[in-house]
Image: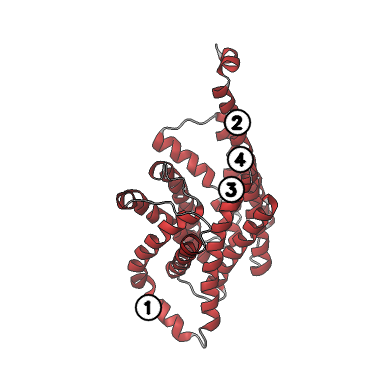
Amino acid sequence: MGVGAILLWWCFNVMTVVSNKWIFQILEFKFPLTVTIIHLVVSSVGAFISISLLRLKPLIHVNSVDRAQRILPMSLVFCLNIVLGNVSLKYIPVSFMQTVKSLTPATTLILQWLVWGKVFDRKVWLSLLPVVGGILLASLTELSFNTIGFFAAFFGCLVTSTKTILAERLLHGFNFDSINTVYYMAPNAAAVLCLVAPFVEGGGVLRWIQEQESLGMPLLVLVGSGVVAFCLNFSIFYVIQSTTALTFNVAGNLKVAVAIAVSWFVFRNPISVMNGIGCTITLLGCTFYGYVSHKVSSSSTQQIQQPEEILPATKV
């Protein structure tokens, strides 16, 4: 079950990233807001079918007050996170985008420390050095570097971290799974983008439509990418359910490596030796960080569970 869920997760992740890049690069549909709206609408429909019709997951009920005070702010962050990811894919290769996004653990740690005053073990901080160093090397040696794409990916890390931190506060007690998250947040996020996208991309989308000889295949790719993106969310639930936290972390980093390899095979974006080394250091660093975090967390849990055995040894 665990291995099958991980392989399915990898498959949908690769398909999502590659199909989005295909839309921007091959179809030349360079409208990240519109692509995000399509994904959100398809995901909303998919979540409704999964919960209300197929009953694959029970609906977690949320009252109107909590929807306004908790779900709506999270929906805005949820929306911005997806938009920034699509914007970065528009300008930079998948390999570089995935590498920069690996900075998320570091930005999450820093924000938790700055905003909430959370204290972390020094080993956890030191374990992030390979991640930061690898991303710096990859950025300096990226042959297809683009400032807009880089900062979109970087701010995407900050938004992802913000989403994680806010979820701990705003969604405390709801115990949302990935499908219920999409069920509540995707419609709100799509509605917000529908107010903005026509003014930002409307003219360009209309010109693109007029330039197409046939809309059948492009529409199939656009809607298909939304279906795959929803399936990715669905698969995450089963991976979390059937694996340990450490396995999930390692599998997540291997997933990035698989996505980079497949995207290079499809798009053949140039990667220098030093850039490849930077990507490798980053991915290995993320795995090392996950391992150290897991060990420190396990050690802290043991100290809480067995204070009479551990506390005397730590006294000065």
> On the picture, is 97 further left or further right than 119?
right
Select label 2 or label 3 by which is in front: 3
> On the picture, is 256 further left or further right than 153?
right
Residue extending furthest toward the bottom: 213
Q: Amino acid at mark 4?
A: Gly
Quadrant location of the C terminus in the rendered image: top right
Q: Amino acid at mark 3?
A: Ile
Residue 92 appears in the picture as rendered: no
* Identity of the residue drawn at 64% across and 43% down: 287
Report, in whole angstroms, how far the alpha carbon at label 4 lies from the one at label 2.
12 Å
Select label 1 or label 2 by which is in front: 2
Which x, y percent locates residue 257?
66, 54
Point out the tag, 3 or 4, that comes first from the N-terminus.
Answer: 3
Q: Amino acid at mark 2?
A: Ser
| Disc 2 target residue | 298
Report, in whole angstroms, how far the alpha carbon at label 4 lies from the one at label 1.
45 Å
- How crowded pointer 3 is (Cα within 10 Å; few <14, some 14-19, many 20+) is rated as some
| Disc 3 target residue | 240
Point out the tag, 2 or 3, that comes first from the N-terminus.
Answer: 3
Q: Which mark is residue 203?
A: 1
Select label 3 or label 4 by which is in front: 3
Which x, y percent locates residue 90?
51, 66
Which x, y percent locates residue 282?
62, 47
Element at badge 1? Answer: helix
**Where on the picture, by quarter, is residue 145?**
bottom right
* Observer-nearest of 38 and 145: 38
Element at badge 3? Answer: helix
Q: Which mark is residue 290?
A: 4
Select label 4 or label 2 by which is in front: 2
* Observer-nearest of 137 and 222: 222
Point out the tag, 4 or 2, that comes first from the N-terminus.
Answer: 4
Which x, y percent locates residue 58?
48, 54
